[in-house]
């Protein structure tokens, strides 16, 4: 029997944790489903990544209301992926912030990405009809932006490409907490279908140089302790480095995408096969690695049709 497309067979709900990391930082995590971050300051709240739908975002709101009555002033999008941004309207935040590169990607491919992601992972889009449309940032920046929630400083940093062209992390210099978005995963496979694999490790080195005390990854449990933060970053680096190396060596000797997919999956499985969404990610990940190995600089747009065509050709 062929494998069900992407994660259409993944229907089991996950257990949610809302962890207090100190300094007003909280991690909303769900056993490998997309995380949200929360920063509570003296006079307001910032939410980092919103969940996929306004109905799903209500649960994040309830957790926030369990710890503060302060207004939600800022929503930050770490990158453009639908599963992280389309719940934004639920928070009613006056400011929705993203890097200019992320805003450009929403304009260029947000609509295709919305359709593609809903079909890949229907469980993650509960009450999809509550999404009012694409989420448009009304503040954008390049490089760095600093904000203050009263006395709590938040630095939004675009340190380089990796998971996407527009990746942004949030850094709390006082409490040394890092919100990495999908640049770092912990116990979950990195999705690299829209990635810049060659550049990703250099971006990770800049994250590591911040020396976080705690880290909220894009997926997986919150990571506490400097050594464990470095481990999470290092595991992500190993995954993306091995993936690209495998695609390059196959490409160099003229192997087909399908053969490279098989080789690479077997090469990564012993180390990463138990990570959440490994089997979901690999066809997309190897497709992008193959393109990058062949000199295609910018990731090609995934459409619902391209998703199906790729899955049929690799999984049949
Ligand atoms: Zn993502």
Image (cartoon, grey):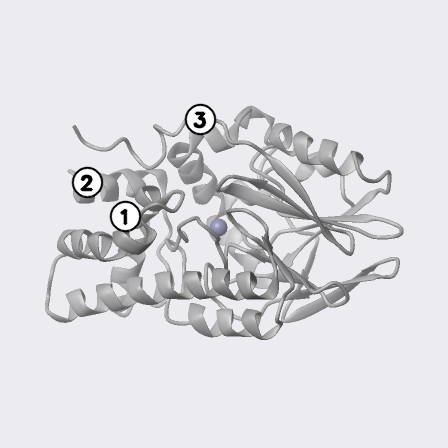
State if disc 1 and disc 2 touch (CB < 8 Å): yes
**Residue bearing the label numbered 3:** 12
Q: Residue at x 53, y 27 (%)?
A: 128
For residue 174, above or below residue 84: below
Disc 2 crowd rating (10 Å Cα; few below 14, some 14-19, many 20+) is: some
For residue 302, above or below residue 267: above
Looking at the image, tell me whether mark 3 or mark 2 is earlier in sequence order: 3
Q: Is residue 154 left or right of residue 266?
A: right
The N terminus: image quadrant: top left
Quick one: SS at disc 3?
loop
Quick one: SS at disc 2?
helix
Q: Which residue is drawn at 27% across and 51% down?
A: 269
Disc 3 crowd rating (10 Å Cα; few below 14, some 14-19, many 20+) is: few
- Return the x and y of residue 298 as percentages of the image width and height: 38, 64
**Residue bearing the label numbered 2:** 315
Front residue of this view, candidates 149 and 88: 149
- Return the x and y of residue 2 as percentages of the image width and height: 18, 31
Circle nearer the viewer, 1 or 3: 3
Quick one: SS at disc 1?
helix
- Return the x and y of residue 213 as percentages of the image width and height: 65, 63
Q: In this view, does 293 lie to the left or right of 27?
A: left
- Return the x and y of residue 74 as percentages of the image width and height: 75, 50
**Residue bearing the label numbered 1:** 283
Looking at the image, tell me whether mark 2 or mark 1 is earlier in sequence order: 1
């Amino acid at each position: 029997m062929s494998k069900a497309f992407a994660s259409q067979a993944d229907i089991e709900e996950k257990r949610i944790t809302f962890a207090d990391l100190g300094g007003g930082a909280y991690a909303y995590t769900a056993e490998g489903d997309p995380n949200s971050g929360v920063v509570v300051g003296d006079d307001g709240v910032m939410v980092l990544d919103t969940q996929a739908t306004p109905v799903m975002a209500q649960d994040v709101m309830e957790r926030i209301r369990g710890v503060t009555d302060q207004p939600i002033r800022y929503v930050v999008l770490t990158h453009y992926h639908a599963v992280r941004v389309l719940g934004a309207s639920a928070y009613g935040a006056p400011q929705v912030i993203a890097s200019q590169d992320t805003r450009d990607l929403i304009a260029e491919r947000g609509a295709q990405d919305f359709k593609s992601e809903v079909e890949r992972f229907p469980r993650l889009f509960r009450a999809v009809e509550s999404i009012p449309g694409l989420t448009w940032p009304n503040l954008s920046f390049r490089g760095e932006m600093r904000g203050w929630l009263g006395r709590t400083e938040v630095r939004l940093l675009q340190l380089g490409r990796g998971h996407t062209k527009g990746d942004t992390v949030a850094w709390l210099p006082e409490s040394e907490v890092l919100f990495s978005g999908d640049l770092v995963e912990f116990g979950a496979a990195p999705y690299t279908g829209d990635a810049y694999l060659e550049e990703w490790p250099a971006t990770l080195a800049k994250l590591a140089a911040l020396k976080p005390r705690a880290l909220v990854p894009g997926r997986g449990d919150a990571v506490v302790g400097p050594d464990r933060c470095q481990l999470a970053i290092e595991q992500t680096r190993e995954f993306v480095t091995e993936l690209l190396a495998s695609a390059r060596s196959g490409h160099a000797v003229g192997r087909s995408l399908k053969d490279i997919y098989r080789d690479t999956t077997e090469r990564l499985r012993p180390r990463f096969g138990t990570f959440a969404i490994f089997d979901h990610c690999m066809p997309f990940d190897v497709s992008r690695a193959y393109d990058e190995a062949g000199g295609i600089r910018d990731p090609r747009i995934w459409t619902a049709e391209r998703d199906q065509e790729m899955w049929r050709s690799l999984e049949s």
